């Protein structure tokens, strides 16, 4: 049977059951407008749908009934028992047609001519005169229940009332076929709570089963082996069936979308078609509820901002009709939902600019980001819509809500886009919330579970070789395919004893938490396991590192680590809160005078040691002094296929005559004001030459002495020692205010510096600072 | 919450599960007690307040183990792997109080319950309703929900 028809039959059967009761209640309270409207709507729906499905007979009957209800609703007819009876007969007729369709197809042989005539006669009846309506001047109390005897009726109606129900039964019963209706008993409604209880019980059963199996493994030739295996099998089957009770095809959520797209395209004057694939992909009902809104939002955005107007599309050489494609499929225990449009795509540069404007990130950080990371900004709260992507409106309306909802269920969003060709949103969503796949890791002898969805890869570290954990002071970093991966040690994080020193077998788990990627150092990686997530006890709620706890196969309790919570413990984890552009932050440093920052401590030239905020440094490098070339008064070095300018961190710093020199690499974003538009507009790198890298520390920075020098923010006490804080923005040349002054000052400073270097045997003269 | 008065009006007895920490005796009303467990393997939960020892698996339910000794500022005589646990239920959540020993259930007349003298530390007064004077020793009543409130407040401070 057609899916649509089946749904219609189930729904109608339910609606009719309610209709009987409603009509009985209406008889007791004929003036209840709300009730009349509700009955009218039900009949109207049946009429409309049957017309749609080509059930003409059903449509005719429902239509005739609806007409009568219409009179009741308009108040031109009173719901006397006769009227109610007629309507009930109409309802019975609908029931028998439904039964006929369910059992054998077709609407049955009966033509209901008499009923239709009666309904039509009532419909055509002249409005009731006050005379006939008058006896009902004592309206029954509206709250009389359906089972109580009918309230006082007009005299004329009196005898009819008791007779009618009998008549209804008499006509209805012979019509009913002997065969049992099918759709009515195919589904039953079960409370969601009961389902949840079932699922919880089954989860416990699975855990117990796992424990039993583990015991069995250690015992050979146990008499329990066979029955246990049987139990195991049944448990698995039970689990599967119970989980299925929660599964619903994603098409249920998609069903409203074609209509939305149709309305939107009319509203926006665009031509949009919606293609859907994989609508029978099933996922957890609970998950389905939660992704409904995000999905609608993304599609709405795609139609609104992604798809261009027909004229624009033709001008761009695209078909006039825009396409939004939905595709859902299973992939490795997750559901992937792709929403693709063939519109104009996202404009990475505009998002970059906007991100800077909004103070969401610094230029240095932005420069290191891939387009995919940049697109993630549209998922940020407060990434305002207007002029983000287009002049008219932005493609970021409420996208943070989308992200929050998706992350709430442990899902991820990926955005990709090709300018002019369209954008693609990829939602990766767990099949179910109750059971997740997790990586079991060990740290100081305790086990923890990490949700598999956040794990990107595992890196085995060794003391030598490529994947070596490198330390600058106490801070560890990992060079992973030419990128510096910030590392966080689970031992530090959980304040375990540090003294158990063996770090050789440690494993770095590369974790993606939102747009942030970092490495978590653990002692061991044991296994993956399907775990049942249980919420933590209220006394543990305050700890954001855990997202829940679970019982492992061996019966022990294990905390589930929340990658997003861990990310908060990274120095710069919460990009949205902590970072602004360096200039702003430097000013903050200067103004507020205090801030807890990670600092790289260096020695450069004479005087006290110097410190640079670590998060502004892209890389630490060693540069061979012999490779430094001099051009136009600048020091240049061939670095990663590009030229990098070098500046000295202190005017009195002297380059070594041979060997290598430590260099801090900063990324600089091209700005429009820079001279020479023909130059390569990609980001530039600037290397700050220092004498020695000392340490990394985290400290409150309170500028105590301000020398008024542009290259030094001032001096502060860092870890109990006086330290000069280097003004990075001065070297990056993005200090707008007083740039000229500083430039001149810088030039003189560097001229000074040049003398020193000249003295060390290098013949160059640095007259132009990068800042100018 | 003055149970002395409430109960005096009805039937003035209180059923208590008695337990001990060192030389001190404590009682928790029977209605709060869910289970008494022998020594358990407690899985540590780092970053929690000191009073939270970890969690255990009680027939598929996760129970948070609290160290009553830490809450009261006392010393436990037995090691954690040999101590007993009194499982209490609070709003469907289960907690276990780790103690040295668990004694019998005593039915005591409420009329003999005396409020804690004000000289007791505030921490003790916060979680106890009063003291029963037994022939050979004193028995301090404990209110599980108030113990949890104290620990939650501590965790809040840490977080």
Image (cartoon, coloured by chain):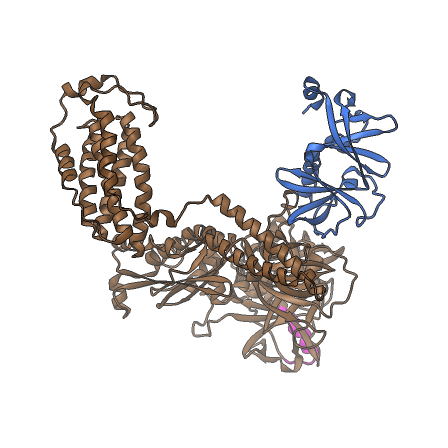
Q: Which shade is chain A?
A: brown
Examine the image and state in which quarter residue A270 appears: bottom left
Which chain comes out blue in the rendered image?
Answer: B
Residue A755 belongs to magenta span: yes
Q: How many marks?
A: 0
Residue beneath the point at 46% across and 64% down: A330
Q: Which residues are magenta?
A: A750-763
Examine the image and state in which quarter residue A80 appears: top left
Q: Position of residue B123 (x, y in %)?
A: 76, 33
Q: Nearer the viewer, residue A463 or A687?
A: A463
Q: Judge left or right: residue A761 versus residue A164.
A: right
Residue ranking furthest to the right: B136
Quadrant for the N terminus of chain A in the image: bottom left
Q: Judge left or right: residue A303 versus residue B36.
A: left
Q: Position of residue A282 (x, y in %)?
A: 43, 58
**A70 shown above or below B14:** below
Residue A546 belongs to magenta span: no
Secondary structure mostly taken by the magenta-highlighted segment of the chain = helix
Q: Position of residue A306 (x, y in %)?
A: 35, 60
**A86 shown above or below A494:** above
Residue beneath the point at 31% across and 29% down: A25
Q: Judge left or right: residue A420 versus residue A676.
A: left
């Amino acid at each position: 049977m057609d899916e649509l028809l089946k749904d219609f039959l189930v729904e109608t059967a339910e609606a009719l059951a309610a209709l009987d009761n409603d009509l009985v209640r209406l008889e007791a309270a004929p003036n209840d407008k709300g009730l009349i409207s509700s009955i009218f709507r039900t009949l109207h729906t049946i009429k409309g749908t049957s017309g749609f499905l080509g059930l003409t007979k059903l449509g005719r009957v429902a239509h005739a009934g609806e007409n009568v209800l219409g009179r009741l609703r308009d108040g031109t007819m009173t719901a006397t028992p006769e009227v109610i009876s007629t309507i009930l007969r109409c309802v019975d007729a609908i029931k028998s047609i439904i039964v006929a369709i369910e059992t054998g197809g077709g609407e049955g042989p009966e033509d209901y001519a008499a009923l239709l005539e009666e309904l039509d006669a009532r419909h055509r009846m002249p409005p009731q005169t006050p005379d006939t309506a008058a006896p009902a001047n004592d309206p029954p109390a509206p709250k009389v229940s359906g089972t109580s005897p009918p309230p006082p009726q007009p005299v004329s109606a009196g005898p009819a009332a008791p007779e009618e129900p009998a008549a209804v039964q008499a006509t209805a019963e012979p019509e009913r076929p002997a065969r049992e209706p099918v759709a009515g008993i195919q589904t039953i409604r079960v409370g969601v709570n009961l389902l949840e209880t079932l699922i919880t019980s089954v989860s416990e059963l699975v855990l117990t089963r796992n424990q039993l199996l583990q015991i069995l493994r250690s015992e050979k030739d146990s008499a329990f082996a066979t029955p246990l295996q049987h139990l195991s099998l049944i448990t698995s089957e039970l689990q599967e069936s119970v989980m299925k009770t929660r599964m619903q095809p994603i098409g249920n959520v998609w069903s409203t979308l074609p209509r939305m797209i149709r309305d939107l395209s009319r509203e926006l004057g665009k031509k949009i078609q919606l293609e859907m694939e994989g609508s029978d992909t099933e996922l957890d009902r609970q998950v389905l509820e939660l992704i409904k809104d995000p999905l609608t939002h993304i599609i709405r955005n795609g139609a609104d901002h992604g798809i261009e107007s027909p004229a624009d599309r033709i001008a761009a050489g695209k078909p006039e009709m825009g396409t939004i494609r939905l595709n859902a499929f299973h992939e490795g225990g997750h559901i992937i939902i792709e929403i693709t449009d063939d519109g104009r795509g996202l404009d990475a540069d505009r998002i970059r600019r906007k991100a800077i404007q909004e103070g969401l990130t610094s230029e240095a950080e932005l420069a290191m980001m891939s387009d995919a990371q940049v697109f993630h900004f549209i998922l940020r709260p407060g990434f305002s819509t207007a002029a983000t992507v287009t002049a008219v409106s932005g493609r970021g309306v409420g996208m943070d809500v989308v992200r929050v909802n998706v992350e709430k269920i442990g899902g991820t969003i990926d955005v990709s886009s090709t300018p002019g060709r369209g954008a693609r949103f990829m939602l990766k969503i767990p099949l179910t919330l109750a059971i997740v796949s997790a990586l079991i890791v060990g740290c100081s002898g305790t086990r923890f579970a990490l949700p598999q969805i956040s794990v990107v890869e595992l890196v085995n570290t060794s003391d030598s070789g490529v994947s070596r954990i490198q330390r600058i002071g106490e801070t560890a970093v990992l060079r992973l395919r030419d990128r510096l991966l910030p590392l966080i040690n689970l031992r530090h994080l959980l304040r375990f004893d540090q003294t158990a020193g063996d770090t050789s077998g440690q494993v770095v788990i590369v974790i993606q938490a939102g747009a942030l990627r970092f490495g978590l150092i653990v002692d061991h990686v044991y296994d993956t396991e399907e775990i049942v997530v249980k919420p933590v006890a209220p006394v543990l709620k305050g700890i954001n590192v855990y997202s829940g706890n679970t019982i492992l196969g061996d019966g022990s309790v294990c905390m589930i680590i929340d990658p997003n919570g861990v990310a908060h413990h990274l120095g710069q984890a919460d990009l949205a809160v902590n970072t602004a552009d360096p200039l702003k932050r430097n000013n903050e440093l200067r103004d507020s005078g205090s801030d807890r920052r990670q600092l790289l401590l260096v020695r450069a030239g004479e005087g006290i040691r110097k410190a640079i905020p670590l998060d502004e440094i892209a890389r630490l490098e060693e540069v061979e002094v012999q490779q430094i070339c001099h051009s136009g008064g600048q020091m240049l070095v061939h670095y990663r296929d590009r030229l990098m300018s070098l500046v000295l961190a202190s005017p009195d710093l002297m380059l070594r005559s041979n060997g290598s020199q430590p260099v801090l690499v900063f990324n600089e974003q091209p700005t429009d004001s820079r001279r020479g538009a023909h130059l390569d507009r990609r980001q530039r790198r600037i290397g700050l030459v220092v004498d020695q890298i000392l340490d990394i520390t985290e400290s409150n920075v309170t500028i105590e002495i301000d020398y008024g020098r542009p290259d030094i923010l001032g001096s502060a006490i860092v870890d109990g020692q006086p330290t000069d804080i280097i003004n990075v923005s001065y070297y990056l040349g993005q200090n707008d205010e007083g740039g000229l002054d500083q430039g001149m000052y810088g030039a003189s400073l560097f001229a000074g510096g040049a003398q020193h270097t000249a003295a060390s045997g290098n013949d160059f003269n640095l007259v132009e600072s990068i800042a100018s | 919450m003055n149970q002395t008065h409430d109960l005096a009006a009805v039937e003035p007895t209180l059923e208590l599960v008695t337990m001990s920490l060192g030389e001190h005796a404590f009682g928790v009303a029977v209605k709060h007690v869910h289970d008494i467990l022998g020594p358990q393997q407690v899985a540590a939960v780092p970053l929690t307040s000191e009073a939270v020892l970890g969690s255990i698996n009680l027939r598929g339910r996760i129970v948070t183990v609290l160290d009553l000794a830490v809450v009261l500022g006392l010393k436990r005589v037995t090691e954690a792997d040999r101590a007993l646990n009194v499982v209490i239920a609070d709003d469907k959540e289960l907690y276990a109080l780790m103690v040295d020993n668990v004694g019998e259930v005593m039915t005591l007349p409420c009329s003999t319950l005396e409020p804690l003298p004000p000289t007791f530390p505030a921490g003790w007064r916060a979680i106890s309703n009063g003291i029963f004077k037994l022939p050979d020793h004193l028995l301090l009543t404990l209110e599980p929900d108030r113990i949890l409130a104290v620990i939650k407040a501590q965790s809040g401070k840490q977080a």
